[in-house]
Image (cartoon, rainbow, N blue to C red):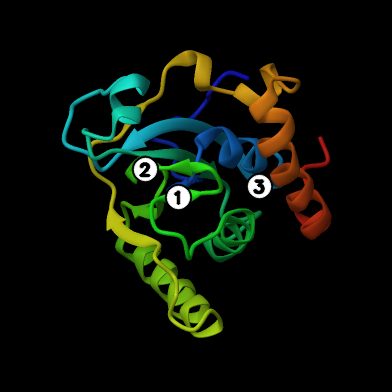
Amino acid sequence: MEHTYQPEDSDTKVMTLGGGCFWCTEAVFVRVRGVIDVESGYCNGHTLKPTYAQVCEGDTGHNEVVRVVYDPKRISLRELLEIFFVIHDPTTLNRQGNDAGTQYRSGIYWSDEADREVAQQVLDELNVALSDRVVTELERLDNYSKAEDYHQDYFANNPHQGYCAFVVAPKVQKFVQTFTDRLKLD
């Protein structure tokens, strides 16, 4: 899949989300009706244009994220965040399953104040539901860079690779079963 995001397109919105391994998060959001593009990347660290190896060492401060470009006429930010919170565990600090480290932290990274307000509302509601155990950070997007090409569409290109088969595929299946009404039909 070619990543088609055009920043000047006023009919789209962008939200950057960190929900553990970006392969998992991307594999879900590419299936969501109203999502136009999903790009794996890194954000909110201090190294400019880090490599995957640098991020995995844990010294750059970056998080593995997906940049989700969506059509707000077809899906709202609240709906995207509802999906986001079902497909990862927002109560584990710097960990998703066996993936551990600050690069796997739960995070919502905003560029628009109105989006921050929506995200804060959803986080507040989730915190009530989960007895104040949510550790998802809500921060302004900073120092974003696209991940290496081989990370893009990783699950689609490597469905039988071990991690994809045993970790990514179940998350995709959970999304499909939970959000059948939000699946892309094309």
Compare marks 1 and 3 and give the one earlier in the sequence: 3
Q: Residue at x 26, y 23 (%)?
A: 50
Are the two marked residues, 2 and 1, in contact with CB atoms closer than 8 angstroms? yes
Query: Which residue is nearer to you in this view: 29 or 113?
Result: 29
28 left or right of 183 in image: left
Residue 142: mark: none
Q: CA distance from mark 2 to mark 1?
A: 6 Å
- Which residue is labeled 1 in the image? 95
Mark 2, residue position: 101
In-image side of 144 versus 175 (left or right): left
> Nearest the camera: 181 or 52?
52
When asked about the image quadrant of residue 86, the answer is bottom right
- Disc number lying in front (1 or 3): 1
Q: Quadrant of the N terminus?
A: top right
* Residue 150 appears in the picture as rendered: yes
Instruction: Please tell me which residue is depicted at 57% across the width and 32% down the height of the picture.
Output: 23
Q: Secondary structure at mark 3?
A: loop
From this view, report whether residue 138 is shown above or below residue 61. Answer: below
**Secondary structure found at label 2:** loop
